[in-house]
Every structure is written in structure tokens, then in C-alpha cells.
Image (cartoon, grey):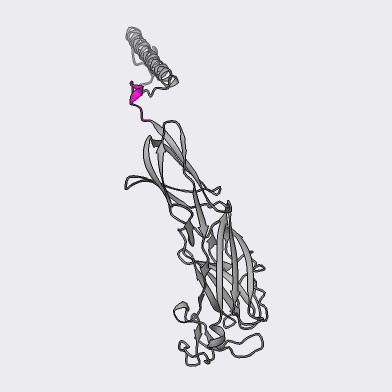
Amino acid sequence: MSLWNALPGHGYLPLDSFRKFLRMFTKLFVLKQIVFLVMVLLMTSFMLSCSSDSSSGQDPRDPDDSQTEDLGELSGMVTDEDGNVYDNVSITLKEGTTTLRVVRTENTGVYTFTNVRVGSYTVEIELPLSSSAVGSDSHSVTIRKNATSNADFVVRPSSIEGDLVLGAGDILGEVRNAMGNVPSSASELLYAVNVFTDQALVPILDAEGEHVTLGQWDNAEGVAEIYCDGETSFFELSFSGLLPDGVYTLWVGTMNTQPMGTGAMGNPNGTENVLDVDGAGNASISVEMDSGSLSVSGSIPSCVLTSQLDVVLILDYHIDGNTYGPSPGPDHTDVGHIIFSL
């Protein structure tokens, strides 16, 4: 029944009954208003009390400020001996043998543990790939109240020797003899096999069009040094014993990512990964790469030395003497010669 229908003259209640109803309705309304005002006053008083406690530096949940935990902070930086900073490096905070927290460095090389209880701890670095620690890979630290303790790490990039794409180093089974088997004699002629297509044997020819022997192929050696600095990876590679005046390109791959990453080193358009091989088979190259998409598939982080990756570098020989920019080239035109596993 609506209030409008209860009004006199609408055939529902006599006037006296309506007045009684109106008085009862008014009392209920006033009572609700009083209860609401009391609730507002109580909430205001509680909020003022909390504000007073907070401004004095005391946790309102703990009336005894001396019982509040004493906290500090731990910070540090990961660099190499030249001052280059390393990002995405894993740093672990331990109490005894118990791991408390793990963080990773930022692109400035800095890591930070906040809100650490006062006490003695150990901080450890998970070394970047192909690097060693200068000094120690762990430090003992003491955390003091309202203070920042410091523990830096210095790493040293290690030289990486390349493996010949042959036998155990021939991951894809690309280099074979005339019978389609792994060559073993220095005088055997070499053939390239595309394991993903028709398995055809394609003669590996040098820059003069002569058929390459195992003895010539087996002369190749390569050394790589890699370091990071903030958002960039730097590669320095040198080679000897390559096929004289041969056409070679460099490629990078990430084996444990989805999708697997593959692309030209340096600029993704393939203009920076071509080697200048001299008549004695020697070459050197310096390449840098920022994080981003690779030319064929996948992507690469700012520092390829992060322990989260399984990275390979491949020196590709172009049998037809041509390069193909962001792609290694059509089937039967290229074959891996040296591979580096970080």
C-alpha cells in the first residue's frame, strides 16, 4: 500500500487511523536519523584516533612501539671491470642456508631488497653466462635499522671458443661426405645436407668454385667475447682458418624460448652480420644488439648473458657466394661452419 493510497478520501483508512499511522511513521524516521548520526560520530572518533597514532610514528595495531620490527634495506650494482652494467642478473638474499628472496638487476645494473629485518645475511649472484666473478660471488651483509647496506658484484666476461660444425658439433647433421656419412678423412670432399627438406647432398665449394675437403674445413677456429651495458649486448668475434675470401654471415639463436629465436646479428635487416674474410681465411667483427625482435623469429633481451637463456651464435658459410639480408638464404645455399654455445 502506498502512502498516496492511504490518504483520506481514497477509501482505505479513516482520518484518525491515518493520523496514528503518520505519527508512527514520523517516530520511526526520527529514530533512524538518530542512529545514523550516532554511527557517524563513532566512525569519526575512531578515524581521528588512528590519525593521531599514525602521526606519532606508532603502528595503531601495536600500542607498544618498541615491538615494531626494525627494518633496513640492501642495495648494490653488477658491473664488469670496465664499468659496464648488467641487467636481469639474478641476486639471492639468504639467512644461513635459507633463501629469503630473489630479485633481478634493472637496466642500470642496480638491485634492491627493501624491508629487510635487522640482522646478518648472505647475498649471492648467479653469474651471467660465460663470465666469472672478480673477487667473490657472495657477500656477508649486516642490515641496520632505517639504513641502506651495500654489496656490489664485479664480473669478468670469458672468451668463448667456437666449435666446428662437424661430427659432435654438427647439431643438425649438415656436413657429410659423398655417402651421406660423417666425414673422417682429410681428403674427403664435403657436402651440405638440408635436414629439413629433401636431404639432397650439395657440394660445398670455395670462393674459386673448388670442392672443399675435410682438411680445409677442419682448419677453422673462432673466439668470441661478449659483454653487456644496460640495454645493449656487445659481441667481439675473431676467426682464422676460414675458407679464403669466403662469404660468411653471423646469426644468433635462443634455444629455450617459445618460439625459438633466430635472426641476423646486429641490425635485423642483415646489413651488419657479414664478415670480411681475407685471402688467408682471417676475419674479425664487432656487433652490438639491443633488445627486440629478431629477423627470422622470436626476440632477444637487452643482455644475452642472462642465465634465463640458452644462446648460440652461428657462423654461416654461403656456398653460392651471396647473402640474403634478414634471412640465411634459400635451401642448399648455406651451411654452418662454427657454432658458439654460451
**Vertical comparison of 239 with 104: above or below:** below
Q: Main secondary structure of the magenta part?
A: loop
Residue at position x 44%, y 37% in the image: 73
The spot of residue 276 in percent (x, y) is 67, 74
In the image shown, does 190 or 93 lie closer to the viewer?
Answer: 93
Residue 149 % position (x, y): 46, 38
User: For the view shown, which residue lies furthest in the front direction?
Assistant: 135
Quadrant of residue 267 within the rendered picture = bottom right
Whether residue 61 is visible here, answered yes or no, is: no
Q: Is 67 inside the magenta-drawn segment?
A: yes
Residue at (62, 86) in percent of width and height: 206
Residue 22 in percent (x, y) is at: 36, 10
**Chain part drawn in magenta:** 62-69
Question: Residue 225's quadrant in the figure?
Answer: bottom right
Residue found at x 55% / y 53%: 81
Q: Is residue 235 visible?
A: yes
Q: Residue at 59% of width from left, 90% of height from top? A: 211
Q: Which of 134 and 250 lies nearest the eye of the viewer? A: 134
Residue 142, magenta (yes or no): no
